[in-house]
Amino acid sequence: MSLVSELVAAVGREHVEELDAGNWRVTPGSAAEVAEVIRRAGALKAAVHPIGTGGRPQRARPDAAGAGGGAAAVDRLRVFLSTRRLDQVLELDETSLMVHVQAGLTGLALERILAPRGLSIGDYPPVVLTSSIGGIIAVRTPGKSSARHGFFEDAVVGVSAVLADGRSVHTRVAPRRSTGPDLARALMGSEGTIGFITSAVLRIHQKPEARLVAAYTLPSIDAAVSAVYLALREEAAPSGLRIYDAAEAFEHFDGLVLPPQQALLCAGTAGPTDLAACDRDLITSAVLAEGGQPTDTALAELWWRRTHAGEPTPALAPNLQVMATPSKLRAVYRAVVTELATQGGSARAHISRFDADGAVVFFTLIHGSGDPDAAIVGAAERAAEAAGGWLLGARATKLDPYLRALREAIDPHRIMNPGTLA
Ligand SMILES: Cc1cc2nc3c(=O)[nH]c(=O)nc-3n(C[C@H](O)[C@H](O)[C@H](O)COP(=O)(O)OP(=O)(O)OC[C@H]3O[C@@H](n4cnc5c(N)ncnc54)[C@H](O)[C@@H]3O)c2cc1C
């Protein structure tokens, strides 16, 4: 049978669409159909590319193995397997605060289901929650964390996935306190190369009783970073934090003028009213210890509306994002600002996505009249890396031989998302 007949037999004609020659988009309606599609596609050595909300282009990517391991990469049949119809809540356990959801439901859709019940997925940046649950779990990025609720992957109690040969695995076969390795860890961040995630059990939270915001000025970016980590070391668990340098504050707060070296820190805390106030007080004490002071709360209210309630921010989108550990953040900031000044331009920044492991510096590089050219961006990237930063999308590759061996063992024909990761 041809690939298309196999796909139609698995999910029905109306859920199979030809994108172009040899490339098919298939939209299964259940985990069983996902398994059937992968089994049938694998038997023909067609590649299977999982697709969530489709943040990535639905086009074939270079694949060294090719069909049967030898054919030209472009000749390989490909199935783009979408989770769009896998959008149901399978079980909500309000006592255990856990929800079992299919992979195609977006974080925002889940939040809309939980909110009327006084529940929430957690204080993750809203932009992260526009993705599908499967996509959020399949790609580990620095944005998927919050100082209050940790990394999104820590909220994943179990996953169900289909492997390259069509077998299904369910990692949650016992409560999380049971012993032994957790296979879910191998699937998280595997970008569809280890298996197709069909559903996940997530830990959820009660909607906070109170949300408080506060704004502070500090003498410098260094002082602001120190204040944040002083508070986090004291185990403050804010729902959001953002530091702006003076130039960025001017752009984001409609012409707010701060002395050039100063920084603005906006903080949000949440939870039972007393705890939210306690977290805010911990942050205030840390700010005072670093020579800063509280400022107009209206600035923090505006920040929250713009980052969490969809109010548009007038400033340009950042054009360089760099992750760094707490000890390297200040050096990364200084290195990029100094490099742009040397090149005759300027860089401004805000720092957010804070957790115990570090944060992300969002730079806007300005050079000449338009966007900076590739040489300028390249120079800024090298400066950031030399200062110990990691560029967006950078990945530790030292363990790639082990990842390749794992893939080889469970997917010898490189069916699952070939061309991605090692
Ligand atoms: C390498 C990389 C780095 C990124 N870094 C950032 C970042 O730092 N900040 C940010 O905001 N966004 C980042 N993104 C965007 C990222 O795509 C989104 O954060 C989100 O994970 C995408 O969800 P989605 O539903 O749109 O999935 P898609 O964009 O459709 O898919 C994303 C990847 O996950 C795989 N995938 C999707 N669904 C499943 C599933 N059910 N089972 C198995 N695999 C699946 C896809 O094959 C693809 O490799 C990054 C994306 C990639 C690929």
Image: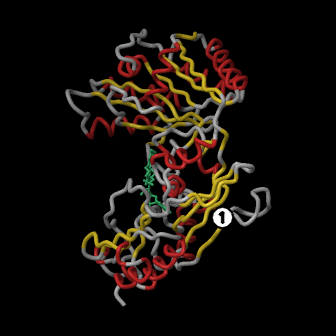
Give how far across and how far down residue 387 sits, in percent: 48, 34
Which residue is found at the position 55% from the left and 20% from the top? 224
Which residue is found at the position 42% from the left and 65% from the top? 82
Quarter of image, res 316: top left
Amino acid under disc 1: Leu
Give how far across and how far down residue 149 sits, in percent: 64, 40
Residue 125 vs 408, above or below: the answer is above
- Seen from the viewer's position, the closer of residues 243 and 376 is 243
- Seen from the viewer's position, the closer of residues 36 and 148 is 36
Which residue of the protein is positioned furthest toward the bottom in this rendering? 1
- Respond yes or no on whether mark 1 lies under 8 Å from ligand 1: no
Question: Where ligand 1 lies, by quadrant?
Answer: bottom left
Residue 337 vs 118, above or below: the answer is above
Which residue of the protein is positioned furthest toward the front in this rendering? 116
| Left or right: 16 as drawn, with respect to 138 | left
Q: Secondary structure at mark 1?
A: loop
Mark 1 residue crowding within 10 angstroms, few (<14) / some (14–19) / many (20+): some
Give how far across and how far down residue 307 sits, in percent: 46, 31
Which residue is found at the position 54% from the left and 45% from the top? 111
Badge 1 is on which residue? 183
